[in-house]
Amino acid sequence: MTSPFIGQPGEAMPRPGGGAPAGGGAPAFAVVVVDADQAARSRLAMQLGQGVTPFGSLNELAARLTGQPVVMVLGPSFNDPDQLAIAEQLISARREVGAIMVATELTTDLLQKALRAGVKDVLQLPVDSGQLVDAVRRVAASLQPSSPPAVAGGQAAGPEVDGGAGKLITVFSTKGGAGKSVIATNLAVTMAMRAKKRGDKPVVLVDADLQFGDIAVMLKLSPQHTIVQAVSALDRLDANLMQNLLIEHEPSGLLVLPAPLEPAFADQIGAEDVRRIIDVLRSFCSLVVVDTPAYFNDVVLTLIEDSDDVLLVAGMDIPNIKNVKIGLQTLKLLGTPTEKLRLILNRADSKVRLDVTEVERTLGVKADSRIPSDVVVPQAVNKGAAVVIDAPKSGVSKAIEELADQFSPAPAGRKKK
Ligand SMILES: Nc1ncnc2c1ncn2[C@@H]1O[C@H](COP(=O)(O)OP(=O)(O)OP(=O)(O)O)[C@@H](O)[C@H]1O
Ligand SMILES: [Mg+2]
């Protein structure tokens, strides 16, 4: 395997100006693996590819540092607090060194300790080579203050935090199974692909269905981190650290902050925590899309309050319409400005024998979007693919594209509704 990093086999540290990492532009950096256990360091070095230098100890590495930026991959022996303390000394003494660590068992406690020691990212073993390479690239970018700004999809450079806060869209419904997650996912994927094409800041999807969120499954992602880690690092959460906790949906460049892997963690996450996380995301993303559970709670109410737009999803059956009517009344009682509410009718086609005009009259709002019912949706969901990518010509994808048009800065000839 050829390394995506600079440096030739046997060349421990690149010469100054000796090349640029993949993604281009930034000055050279070297990648090293440190672990006392030879098998562990060789495995990691092999995963990272040629040109990566293994070291048996931090002392050996320290003796070779030249001032050139170095990304240091700490092996599992650094999961030990004493070893981590030694690494902390090196990280704080040498500004040109950025660290990531791999963990045999990634607990919240270990993550917290590692982040406090100055480690930028922690990945659970066994780790996928692609994830390891991505993590190294992100850290390398943070070592380069003169790097070009972030590209959509969280590629080589660090996050661009200026240029105003990104928009916040919350997708909500008072009825379970109405299609919130399908709509949130496909809207976010569509917007991410548009942002990438335009060279805009990235788009992020947050799964705030804290107990039963399934965005990661829907997009076939295997997250190393979830919103739980973001909450536990809240006291030092900035754009850089946040970016390391996100996972990229590679086909679209969408960044995802998944829901906790265990429903029990939901209790540890409060509305103010989510608000702070969203604020950090808005600082470097052009758009934050949030998926929610099917009931009002503090987190949902805070999200609705902070959102620029709230997409209220209603399935086309009588129980759905009844629940959405109650939801709408509740939102109005809570003082939610009606201008930011958008009604999305899901599975809205003639086959369901419910008249759209009649539904609109009952709810007292016009639908902003009608999404047909189509077998391509469960087919894509079961594959872990976005419908807009899997079946781009389907009626569902066209409806999602039209919905996205309402939020994208209008391409020629199209205006925001
Ligand atoms: N337009 C559609 N056509 C066909 N099937 C659909 C459509 N929208 C959603 N579905 C199917 O309905 C199921 C529920 O959708 P989804 O998970 O998005 O709902 P939800 O509102 O997020 O549910 P929950 O309240 O459980 O989070 C999915 O398995 C999906 O395949
Ligand atoms: Mg859902």
Image (spheres, rainbow, N blue to C red):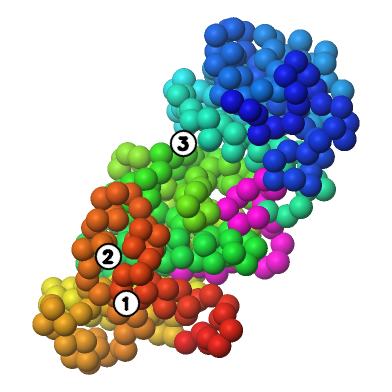
Q: Which residues are magenta?
A: 151-169
34 falls in the magenta region: no
Name the N-terminal-most of marks 3 and 1. Answer: 3
Element carrying mark 3: loop
Can you tell which mark lies on residue 344? Answer: 1
Contact between labelled residues 1 and 2, with CB atoms less than 8 Å apart: yes
Quarter that holds the N terminus: top right
Whether the residue carrying mark 1 lies under 8 Å from ligand 1 is answered with no
Separation of marks 2 and 3 at Cα, in angstroms:
26 Å
Is residue 297 visible in the rendered image? The answer is: no
Comparing 182 with 338, the one in front is 182
The residue beneath circle 2 is 179
**Type of residue at label 3?**
Gln
Separation of marks 3 and 1 at Cα, in angstroms:
33 Å
**Type of residue at label 2?**
Gly
Residue 90: percent from left, percent from top: 75, 21
Residue 140: percent from left, percent from top: 71, 37
Whether the residue carrying mark 2 lies under 8 Å from ligand 1 is answered with yes
Comparing 319 with 56, the one in front is 56
Q: Report the residue at 35% width, 53% height from top.
A: 385
Element carrying mark 1: strand
